[in-house]
Image (cartoon, helix red, strand yellow):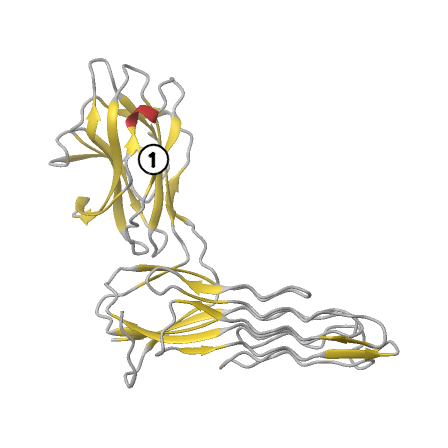
């Protein structure tokens, strides 16, 4: 991994301000009314589908049973790109599933194929999820049934079968297997032809305290770094730290994988009532992970301190986010009239405190500047 200085190109900027949770890439969960079967290791079955997301596959599920003579060996799910209406290039293979774990009763059960290496998909493109039985031994009288519906319930694809290990494919236009394909979610995919990218990341701002005297929330930690040499298609998982609610710390923003950096959220301002009293502002977040001297690392600003005398409170301001500013303004009795003065407005900024109440911090963010 290398970091570089002296960036002069105009970047393409991507802002990740919400956690992209794992979601559905494609599915048909219509009740099955038939099945397609295999009795040989050369007969594979699967489903074409249209991806709803530009994301990576975490798992593929089909509903199956094997009520005959026991089978043995490993079965896989393989993902193929499209080639003129048939499975083309292999782009991913699931972890092995022990075929002996497939339901042996006449009641089928869902079989889920997890992917340790996650194939990357592009939204609105066609792909094929194929159950590969080449590693399975079928004794006489054995079979595997894959549940389907013959009323064409899924508009984004159809059932496919090969009897010679992918040499020739047949499709069934009105048949769709019962299937479910889920994404990893929360991932940045390194695009092709990228020279390097610049990462800017900040944790969530802390919420203020809530009392007659309370401190403002601290800002999230901040890191800035430049990365090059990461292979095209690499999936880098991330999560976005939420802004802390009143009396709550901000969440941690992080990028895992090859980046391995985390910015913790700002802490909440502690609320203390009565006289005399004081309420310390929340401390700012910090940065952890694989840190090098080429990176810019900034601890989040501390929230302002509130204090009270004779029941009259003076409240702390929210910590201002590194580079993004926007710390919440503080209030004082009676001007704030019992409500929080103002929430943090810049990414990762802390909430400002108001008399007897408070405000939330702002969420964190990841900004990636791509240089081609």
Query: In which quadrant of the rendered image does the C terminus lie?
Result: bottom left
Give residue 317's position: percent from left, percent from top.
67, 80
User: In which quarter of the view is residue 339 placed?
Assistant: bottom right
Q: Which residue is mark 1?
A: 152
Residue 188 seen in the figure: yes
Residue 314 seen in the figure: no
In the rendered view, tell whether residue 72 sits above or below residue 62: above
In the rendered view, tell whether residue 134 sits above or below residue 189: above
**Front-most of 101 and 218?**
218
In percent of the image, x 33 and y 50: which residue is there? 51
Give residue 33's position: percent from left, percent from top.
38, 25
Task: Report the side of 223 relative to 307 (left or right).
Answer: left
Give residue 81's position: percent from left, percent from top.
21, 49
In the rendered view, tell whether residue 271 sits above or below residue 312: above
Task: Count neighbours of disc 1 (C-alpha within 10 A) and say few if under 14, some if 14 to 19, many if 20 or more.
Answer: some
User: In which quarter of the view is residue 220 placed?
Assistant: bottom right
In the rendered view, tell whether residue 295 sits above or below residue 59: below
> What secondary structure is found at the residue carrying circle 1?
loop
In percent of the image, x 29 and y 49: which residue is there? 117
Query: In which quadrant of the rendered image does the N terminus lie?
Result: bottom left
Count of numbered tags: 1
In percent of the image, x 40 and y 27: which residue is there? 109
Q: Residue furthest right?
A: 310
């Amino acid at each position: 991994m290398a970091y570089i200085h002296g960036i002069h190109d105009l970047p393409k900027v991507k802002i990740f301000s919400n956690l992209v949770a794992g979601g559905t890439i494609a599915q048909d969960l219509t009740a099955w009314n038939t099945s397609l079967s295999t009795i040989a290791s050369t007969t594979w079955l699967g489903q074409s589908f249209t991806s709803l997301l530009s994301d990576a596959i975490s798992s593929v599920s089909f509903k199956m049973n094997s009520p005959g003579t026991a089978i043995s060996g490993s079965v896989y799910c393989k993902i193929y790109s499209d080639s003129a209406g048939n499975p083309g290039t292999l782009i991913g293979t699931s972890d092995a599933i022990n075929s002996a774990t497939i339901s042996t009763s006449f009641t089928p059960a869902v079989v889920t194929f997890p992917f340790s290496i996650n194939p990357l998909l592009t939204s609105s493109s066609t792909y094929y999820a194929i159950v590969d039985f080449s590693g399975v031994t079928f004794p006489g009288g054995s079979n595997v049934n894959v549940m389907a519906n013959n009323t064409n319930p899924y508009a984004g694809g159809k059932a496919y079968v090969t009897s010679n290990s992918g040499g020739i494919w047949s499709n069934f236009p009105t048949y769709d297997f019962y299937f479910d394909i889920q994404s990893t979610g929360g991932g940045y995919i390194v695009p092709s032809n990228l020279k390097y990218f610049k990462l800017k990341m900040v944790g969530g701002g802390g919420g203020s305290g809530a009392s007659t005297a309370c401190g403002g929330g601290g800002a999230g930690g901040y890191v800035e770094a430049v990365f090059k040499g990461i292979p095209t298609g690499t999936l880098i998982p991330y999560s976005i730290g939420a802004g802390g609610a009143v009396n709550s710390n901000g969440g941690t923003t992080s990028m895992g994988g090859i980046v391995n950096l985390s910015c913790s959220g700002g802490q909440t301002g502690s609320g203390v009532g009565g006289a005399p009293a004081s309420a310390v502002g929340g401390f700012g977040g910090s940065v952890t992970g694989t840190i090098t001297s080429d990176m810019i690392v900034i601890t989040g600003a501390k929230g302002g301190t509130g204090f009270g005398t004779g029941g009259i409170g003076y409240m702390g301001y929210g910590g201002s986010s590194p580079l993004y500013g926007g710390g919440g303004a503080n209030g004082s009795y009676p001007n704030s009239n019992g409500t929080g003065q103002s929430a943090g407005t810049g990414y990762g900024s802390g909430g400002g405190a108001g008399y007897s109440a408070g405000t939330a911090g702002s969420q964190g963010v990841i900004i990636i500047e791509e240089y081609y």
